[in-house]
């Protein structure tokens, strides 16, 4: 249009951002839609938010089924090749500022480069099969005060992403838990006769292992 007003707009499916110079920066795709825990999610939207975080050069997110549960896994190429700043707990907290909990990945894997197809697109099928690196737990695990806390901790470790688990940390917002993990956690806890009265409502109300105990 001579006056600069487009009469027709086309949805490209690309997630982009404008830098200070007005240049368009490609952030990923927004048409890679999956369904997780009843919600439809655009993987490209998560990738775009990740790419905006400090220390993240490139990002790709896939849904995987590991240990019988569907979960979102983020594969990240760090800026400058230094993965030291890609702390999962920090990344998770930053994403929760702008995304609902069901869109926040449970695992974060650093890679030197993302696998790509001949077209240049990220090879998601390869990422779905890629081995996950053993998580390094750098924070010392807080010791339980009681036998009940010890049993709750064992159950939490069995279902949550590998990490140290503070007893006053929120199961959902701090530790990466969600409804399916809460149900799995409860099933393990209730194997102990003295804890069989704990309900899912109690988990949602108490939220921390200490409060549950």
Image: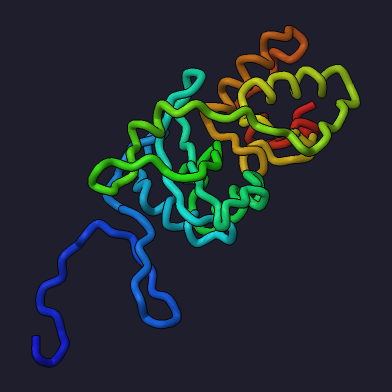
Which quadrant of the structure image shows residue 159?
top right
Report the coloring of the rendering. Answer: rainbow
Quadrant in the picture for the N terminus: bottom left
Which residue appears at 53% of the width and 31% of the height? 179
In this picture, residue 19 sits left or right of residue 96: left
Which of the pair 115/205 is nearer the observer? 115
Instruction: Please tell me whether residue 74 is drawn above or below residue 68 in the rendered image.
Output: below
**Residue toward you, 182 or 205:** 182
Q: Position of residue 168 (x, y in %)?
A: 79, 39
The quadrant in which residue 148 appears is: top right
Q: Is residue 138 above or below residue 91?
A: above
93 left or right of 144?
A: left
Dividing the picture into quadrants, the one containing residue 129 is top left
Task: Relative to 162, say whether 150 is above or below.
Answer: above
Q: How many marks?
A: 0
Residue located farthest toward the bottom when viewing the structure as drawn: 3
- From the viewer's perspective, is 63 left or right of 84? left
The residue depicted at 34 percent of the width and 72 percent of the height is 24
The residue lying at 43 percent from left, 24 percent from top is: 65
**Could you say where residue 204 lies in the image, as x and y percent from the top left?**
63, 35
Residue 167 pos. (x, y %): 79, 34
Q: 137 left or right of 127? A: right
- The residue lying at 80 percent from left, 26 percent from top is 213
Report the front residue among 184 and 57: 57
In the rendering, at what x and y percent does residue 139 appear?
Answer: 79, 38
């Amino acid at each position: 249009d001579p006056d600069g007003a487009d009469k027709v707009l086309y949805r490209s499916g690309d997630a982009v951002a404008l830098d200070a110079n007005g240049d368009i920066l490609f952030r990923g795709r927004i048409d890679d839609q999956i369904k997780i825990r009843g919600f439809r999610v655009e993987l490209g939207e998560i990738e775009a938010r990740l790419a905006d975080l400090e220390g993240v050069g490139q990002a790709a997110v896939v849904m995987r089924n590991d240990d019988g549960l569907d979960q979102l896994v983020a594969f990240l190429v760090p800026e400058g090749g230094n993965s030291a700043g890609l702390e999962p707990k920090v990344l998770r907290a930053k994403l929760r500022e702008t995304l609902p909990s069901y869109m926040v990945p449970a695992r974060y894997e650093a890679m030197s480069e993302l696998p790509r197809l001949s077209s240049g697109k990220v090879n998601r099928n390869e990422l779905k099969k890629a081995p996950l690196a053993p998580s390094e737990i750098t924070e010392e695990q807080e010791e339980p005060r009681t036998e009940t806390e010890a049993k709750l901790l064992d159950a939490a470790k069995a279902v949550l992403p590998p990490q140290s688990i503070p007893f006053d940390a929120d199961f959902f917002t701090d530790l990466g838990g969600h409804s399916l993990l809460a149900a799995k956690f409860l099933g393990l806890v209730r194997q102990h006769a003295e804890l069989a009265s704990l309900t899912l409502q109690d988990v949602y109300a108490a939220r921390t292992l200490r409060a549950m105990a």
